[in-house]
Image: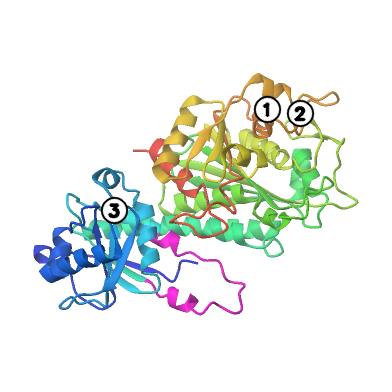
Amino acid sequence: MADGIEIGFGPLGQSGQCPGGSGDLVVFVGDDLTLGSAARDALGASGADLVARAAASEKFKGRSLTALSLPAPGGVEADRLVVVGLGSDKDRAKTDWPVLGGFTASKVSGRTARIVLDWPGATVTAAQAGEFALGARLRTYTFDRYKTKKKPDAEEKAGTALTLLLADHDAASREGDTARSLSDSVILARDLVNEPPNVLYPEEFARRAADLAKLGVEIEVLEPARMRELGMGALLAVAQGSVREPRIVIMRWNGGPAGEAPVALIGKGVIFDSGGVSIKPGGGMEDMKGDMGGAAAVVGALHALAARKARCNVVGAIGIVENMPDGGSYRPSDILTSMSGQTIEVINTDAEGRLVLADVITHVIRSAKPKAIVDLATLTGAIIVALGQDIAGMFSNDDALAGNIHAAGEATGEKVWRMPLIPAYDKAIDSKFADMKNTGGRHGGAATAASFIKRYVEEVPWAHLDIAGVAMSSNASEINRSWGAGWGVRLLDRLIRDHYEAR
């Protein structure tokens, strides 16, 4: 958890003076090693000279995301001085504020620190300070609740306390509250992805999602009997090999005008994916506890929207199942009838996420009549082969929606790359015996999977985000050292904020 970090905001003081105190003092420099006025005032002439001499001795060049630590100079009320590099003018002009916050937090972990947000040519805004605080909180997240023997420094690290010093500190404090709320939402998603499947089985996941009711989210939970009434033959087939019954959770945030069509966010929630009868290899199967990263992102996004009282109508829907092998499992060659009435020939029981999404999407279209749909799913290994573990694949039937999602990804660092949808991919899932097959074979696997989902979205503007590479076991970054990344929460929040909220 990131609960061990405290972040406050304070003034630089009269004439740019930095308030004194114990702990660390953090200042920033570019590649010319020049200090800002507030940092110079805090350190004095001898302090600035000490930084220059220490930098020369340690070959510290002030490059972006580098740091130099040294004892605080005499006369400075601090135990340690930390100098963080910002790089060239070009680097500073495109500062990624959450990344800078995460990197800085990593250099003062477990300590009390005053951070002077000041450097030559910079006027740090309240919004930028809030983004810095967001990155700091996300960097300090850990998931160690099941460790009975903590590492020696675990308790120490939990004591991180940062005070960000800048001119507009009152407004920054308000931005800090927003940042804390958003980081709580990402952390909720991270916790869900990191939980073991014997703890987070479908019923428990539904219970945790239902906690959003405390924030004013309307909750509806569909149990198997209701799914059978609705004809959800695709989702129910995936679940029938497990002793754990499936759930669908519908979460409605009604913050916009009454009667206005909502945006729909839909998440794949396969709590554990063994592959079913088409069982996966044993090596790495433990990672399949994260096959519900899309559902986790949707829950986190609804938390973010409700916590900040977003002025929009949004429906979140997650299909929660386990895909397990037993005598009752669905099989290759079975033919399923989905809620839409379309029939599906099962080729591979490990192509199960698209079956879950098909019925959830149909239900949302019929019940909520959304203006747009974004689904998130850890759907294919093929997308990891194509794009690696830093960018999600995006498929869409609507250029405007795709452009808005791309822009939100660029703004938040949760980047997407649009992939093609062409008739040949759709043709690849035609079946001899049913309306479609649940897999089009090895080649173009991410695209044929997206084509399958596309057959269920009707005429609604839609985007599918294949997040298999970024939601779990993704590459470490300055704002995430967790196995479960909580990927997608910030992107969805930004998408809604920029394009669907009432102004």
Q: Nearer the viewer, mark 1 or mark 2?
A: 1
Element type where label 2 sits in the image? loop
Q: Quadrant of residue 163?
A: bottom left
Location of the C terminus (image quadrant) = top left
Element type where label 1 sits in the image? loop
Q: Is residue 455 left or right of residue 38?
A: right
Q: Dot 1 corresponds to which residue?
A: 455
Using the image as rendered, state which of residue 330 and residue 417 is in the foreground: 417
Q: Nearer the viewer, mark 3 or mark 1?
A: 3
Residue lying at 35% horizontally and 48% vertically, measured from the top left: 96
What amino acid is at disc 1? Arg
Q: Position of residue 406 (x, y in %)?
A: 46, 35
Are dots 3 and 1 in contact, CB under 8 Å? no
Are dots 1 and 2 in contact, CB under 8 Å? yes
Query: Quick check: 161 above or below 349?
Result: below
Q: Dot 2 corresponds to which residue?
A: 342
Query: Quick check: 466 above or below 101?
Result: above
For the view shown, which residue lies furthest in the top direction?
A: 423
Residue 143 lies in magenta, yes or no?
yes
Q: Position of residue 257 (x, y in %)?
A: 43, 38
Q: Dot 3 corresponds to which residue?
A: 86
Residue lying at 40% horizontally and 52% vertically, measured from the top left: 308
Magenta stretch in the rendered image? 136-160
For the view shown, which residue lies furthest in the left direction?
A: 15
